[in-house]
Image: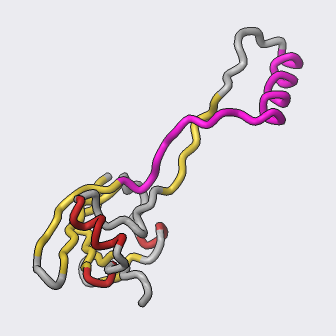
Amino acid sequence: MTEKLWIYQGNPVTNIESIPEDTYGFIYEVTHIPTGKKYIGKKVLYFERSKRLGKKELETLKEERKSKGVGGRTPLKKKVITESDWKTYHGSQKEILELVKEGKKEDFKREILKYVR
């Protein structure tokens, strides 16, 4: 069976374009359908992390600094923003994770309660 989507106000949320602009994340409710147990949590849409610069990027940066006459240390990292795993996320609760690991994703209803800006 295919992965169940997130639902917001009765409508499926299939990709990042389905989410209002300027949204930071969302509050969600995951329901285990067979037992009726519910789990409420929050999820961010993007992760910001530092990534080491590659050799080509470092060399380009050094050349730019030489031509501009800028001194100082060359940064070894850059900030990278990537989309989070929100599409496949079911929660962090151990019981949910075990059921998902067992291949029982279809036993869950995933609802977005509120978008957060």
Residue 103 sits inside the magenta stretch: no
Q: Would you place residue 25 above or below residue 5 in this image?
A: above
Residue 50 sits inside the magenta stretch: yes
Q: Would you place residue 64 above or below residue 113 in this image?
A: above
**On the picture, is 111 further left or further right than 51?**
left
Q: Residue at x 26, y 56 (%)?
A: 42
Compare residues 116 and 32 and report the one nearer the observer.
32
Image coordinates for residue 98, horizontal then vertical, percent: 29, 67
Image coordinates for residue 46, horizontal then vertical, percent: 45, 52
Q: Residue at x 43, y 60 (%)?
A: 21
**On the picture, is 4 further left or further right than 59?**
left
Residue closest to the far top: 71
User: Residue 95 sits in which quadrant?
Assistant: bottom left
Residue closest to the far bottom: 1
Q: Count how many numbered circles sit on residues in the image.
A: 0
The image's colour scheme reads secondary structure
**On the picture, is 19 further left or further right than 78?**
left
**On the picture, is 23 further left or further right than 52?**
left
Compare residues 60 and 107 and report the one nearer the observer.
107
User: Residue 4 sits in which quadrant?
Assistant: bottom left
Q: Residue at x 54, y 46 (%)?
A: 81
Q: Would you place residue 14 above or below residue 81 in this image?
A: below
Image coordinates for residue 41, horizontal then vertical, percent: 22, 58
Q: Residue at x 39, y 65 (%)?
A: 20
Q: Would you place residue 106 above or below residue 99 in this image?
A: below
Q: Which residues are magenta?
A: 44-68
Image coordinates for residue 53, horizontal then vertical, percent: 71, 33
* Location of the N terminus (image quadrant): bottom left
